[in-house]
Amino acid sequence: MACRSKSELNEFVKEARTYAKYGKVADYIPALGKANANDLSIAIRYPDGECISAGDVEKKMTLQSISKVITLALVLMDRGPEEVFKYVGMEPTGDPFNSIAKLEETTPAKPLNPMINAGALVVTHLIKGGSADNRFERLLPFVQTLANNPAISVNEEIARSEFETSNLNRALCYFLKHHRVINEDIEELMDLYTRQCAIEVSSLELARIGLVFALDGVDPESGKQIIPEDIARLCKTFMVTCGMYNASGEFAIKIGIPAKSGVSGGIMGSVPEKFGIGIFGPALDDKGNSIAGIKLLEMLSERYHLSMFS
């Protein structure tokens, strides 16, 4: 069963928006701090081409950590799982997404999974290509293909703001370089990573990317296999186990779908073989997830029995 009623979706958004007042925008990145905490939108895209939406769905958000899933898919296609998982693990963590603690406790110093910042930086490091520009010129068209929009680009103001304030990520990079997990210039890697995070999409485009993953990598319109089936499934598994930061376990119990969030307030959901979801709600909870967006997904999952585990 799936939500096909725009009026019902509008009611869900109206109710979930009341929770935004309990959250806070990500002002530790100054440019993200300009977001309107009361914004909330959702788009649901189906394989048959139908898309229903509610809220200000044309408003743009930057991918932030949602980009980690997309970059992981690209790097797995580039290098294969055996090579990639020499450098990054597959285990969930209860630590915050930007924590350095587990790196210090692990021998060798290998990030636990690709969805925490340390792991994502390693994955971005593994994108094939020479310079940061070469690698970004492979990543951006991949995002455009998944979203079916060649006009998708980077929010340069947010990219610059992140680059200037990403000192904790730099610390993670230097730690990983010390342990020979990363072997490139750190400023070049940070330039690439912050541009990756600042790729800008709408809820409509995010829902389409979520649908491609829901369909195990198949483009819903052309029928083309954009991502190999085994890689799409692997990415969805990481979304279930690690996609919602250190609230992933609770999210799996309450909502139970593969999803990935970002500190801009985006959430991408992939209900296997059914539909893709794109949400934008910049007011975050204390774990870094959209507080109204999570509420919206809870209501949808309860009403339409979306959980993979029920």
Image (cartoon, rainbow, N blue to C red):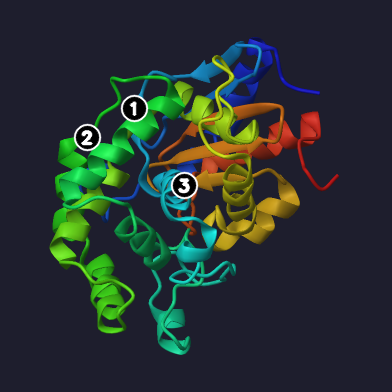
Say what secondary structure mark 2 lies in: loop
Q: Position of residue 26 (x, y in %)?
A: 33, 50
How far separated are the C-alphas under marks 1 and 2? 10 Å
Query: What amino acid is at disc 2?
Result: Asn
Closer to the camera, 77 or 198?
A: 77
CA gap between label 3 and label 2 equals 26 Å
Q: Residues at badges 1 and 2 in contact (C-beta under 8 Å)? A: yes
Left or right: residue 225 versus residue 130 is right
Q: Amino acid at mark 3?
A: Met
Residue at x 50%, y 67% (from the top left corner)? 85
Please identify the residue farthest to the right as the structure is shown.
Answer: 310
Q: Which residue is mark 3?
A: 77
Circle 3 SS class: helix
Quadrant of image for the C terminus: top right
Secondary structure of residue under mark 1:
strand
261 up-or-down from 187: above or below: above
| Residue named by callout 2 | 155
**Residue tagged 1:** 60
